[in-house]
Image (cartoon, helix red, strand yellow):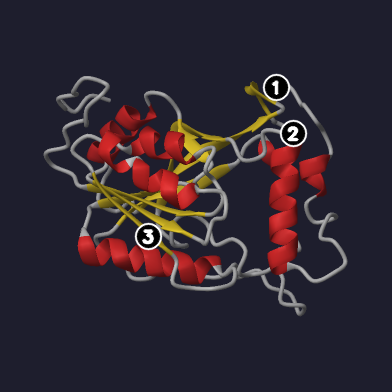
Amino acid sequence: MSTGNTYANDQYKIITPLLTIAGMMRVKDEAEHIGRAVQSINRICDRIYVMDDHSTDGTFEKARQLRPTCINLHMDTFRSPFEGHDEPRDKNYLLGRVLMRAKPDWIVCIDGDEELEPGGDRKLLDALYALPPQIMACALKIEYLWGIPEMVRVDGRYGNFWRASVFRTRGLTHGFRPNPRINNTGTTVLGYPSALHCGNAPPGLACIQLPIRIKHWGYLTAKDREKKLTRWGDAIYPNPSPAPVFQHWQDLEVLTG
C-alpha cells in the first residue's frame, strides 16, 4: 500500500500529517531490551509513555536516558503508583494517562522486551492510513526468539500467535479487562491468574491481522526464561512452584523453524 507519506531519513521521525500515534509500554526489569523496544516505534509515535513497574535492574533510568535520542518525540517515563501485580489495573491507568495527555488517533502497545520488525513502522503507518473506520484494532504476529536471535520457536502456541497490539481511540468505549476465562479457583483455564495477562488492546474490538511481526526477546535464553519464571512465581503464585504452568518455557533449549 502507498499513501504518499513523506518518509524522513531513518534517523528521524516519519512524517505523519494526518494521524497522531502514541506508544504505551508497561515494563518491569527490561533494561536489556527497553532501548530496542522504544527505538522500534519512536519514528511513528508523537509520544511514548513508559510506566515502570518498580524495576530493580535500571530499566527506569535507562528509559529516561533514551529521551534525548528520540528525535522530535516526547517521552513520558514514570514509575507505577501501584504495588503488586495487576496488569488490567496498570494498563488502564496507563491508558488513561495517554488519553488525558495526548488524545492520539491510534495507540501502539508493545512490551518492554519486544521490537517491531525492521521496516514494520512504515508498514504499520501505511496500513493505518488505509483502514476503514469500523476497524478498531490490528493484530500483529508475535515471533518468539529462542536460543539465538536468528531462531524463532514455531511449535504449538508459538507457531501462529497473533496479538492485538494497535488500537484506535476514537469510539473506544472500554479499557482493559481481566481475562474472562476464569474457573472456580480464580485462575484462567490455562492456569494463569486473571490479573497476569490482559492483552495489549482492550478486548472485543473489531480487529484485523496485519502482516507485520513483533520480535519477542524475553524468552531468548534459558537464563531469560528462568528470570521471568522466578519473578512471576514469587510475585503471583503461592508455593508450590508454578513450573507446570510454564513448562513450555523449559521444554526446548533451541527449537528451529
Residue 152: give x, y in percent of width and height.
65, 27
Residue 189 visible from this viewpoint? no
Residue 178: give x, y in percent of width and height.
56, 70
Report how many numbered discs are placed on residues in the image: 3
Q: Earlier in the sequence, mark 2 or mark 1?
A: 2
Q: Earlier in the sequence, mark 2 or mark 3?
A: 3
* Distance in Å between CA atoms under marks 2 and 3: 37 Å
Q: Nearer the viewer, mark 1 or mark 3?
A: 3
Q: Which residue is mark 3?
A: 78
Q: Which residue is mark 1?
A: 257
Kind of residue indicated by mark 1: Gly
* Distance in Å between CA atoms under marks 1 and 3: 38 Å
Q: Nearer the viewer, mark 2 or mark 3?
A: 3
Say which mark, if any, is on residue 155.
2
Helix or strand or loop: what does disc 1 sit on? loop
Whether 1 is drawn above or below 87: the answer is: above
Looking at the picture, tell me which residue is in the foreground, 189 or 221.
221
Report whether 52 appears left or right of 136: right
Q: Residue at x 74, y 52 (%)?
A: 229
Helix or strand or loop: what does disc 2 sit on? loop
